[in-house]
Image: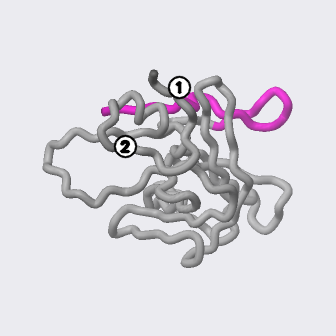
Amino acid sequence: MAKPWQPPTARINTKSRPFPEVVKDMRYCVWSINRLRPDPPGQDQRVTVWTLGSGFFVSPDVFLTCNHVMNSVEQPHQTGDKYQLVQKMSNGSANASPLFVPVLGTDLHLLPDRDAAIIQLRWEPKPYVALGYDDLEEGCEIGVAGYPLPQIVPAANGGQSLINFTYRVAL
């Protein structure tokens, strides 16, 4: 008798498993990234919030995304920027990380020549998918997962709300 599915709590196994099973588990390590920046600068009462893109945990406390997500030409990372990771679960609920202020070169590493950004997080370890170092042949099918195109809009309670916040996967 097959064991019932359980949400992952550690490394996600991607070897020899059907793609839909991997997708179901990936939901637990893929997060959307929000940036909060004082507006105007120098005060902490009012902030502008952006949804930047997506990334995923590659170890229990290391998060990988793209340099163009964290440090775009239009809106580069600035000292003092606060970030929050958010994910939407299949039941419609959302999980959010505590706000964090990464220090460039300590817990935020930007690698523009590889379009990569690595964030070391110091909060509860998360399920993760380990990086593979195998060579992929040109034209090989890959899967991508994330939260494309969410938007932040004013909410009725005076706060802010995410719309178009949908976990999506494509092959």
Assess disc 1: are there few (<14), some (14-19) or many (≥20) residues with their C-alpha within 10 Å of its C-alpha: few
- Residue 89 in percent (x, y) is at 61, 31
Q: Residue 14 carries which label?
A: 2
Whether 80 is drawn above or below 14: the answer is: below
Q: What residue type is labelled 2?
A: Thr
Classify mark 1: helix, strand or loop.
Answer: loop
Across and down, in percent, residue 130 comes to 41, 55
Crowding around mark 2 (Cα neighbors within 10 Å: few <14, some 14 to 19, many 20+) is some
Q: In which quarter of the image is the C terminus?
A: top left
Q: Position of residue 59 (x, y in %)?
A: 50, 59
Q: Distance between the residues labelled 1 and 2?
A: 18 Å
* Residue 145 sits above or below residue 82 on the image: above
Q: In the displayed structure, does residue 88 sit left or right of residue 159?
A: left
Q: Mark 1 points at which residue?
A: 4
Specify the segment rendered in magenta. Answer: 152-171
Find residue 120 and name its label.
none
**The one of 168 and 79 positioned closer to us in this rendering:** 168
Q: Residue at x 51, y 32 (%)?
A: 167
- 65 is higher (above) or lower (below) than 150: below
Left or right, 38 with respect to 152, comes to right
Dividing the picture into quadrants, the one containing residue 99 is bottom right
Which secondary structure lies at badge 2? Answer: loop
Q: Quadrant location of the N terminus? A: top left
Quarter holding residue 144 = top left
The answer to which of marks 1 and 2 sits earlier in the sequence is 1
Please tell me whether mark 1 or mark 2 is closer to you in this view. Answer: 1
Does the magenta segment cover residue 96?
Answer: no
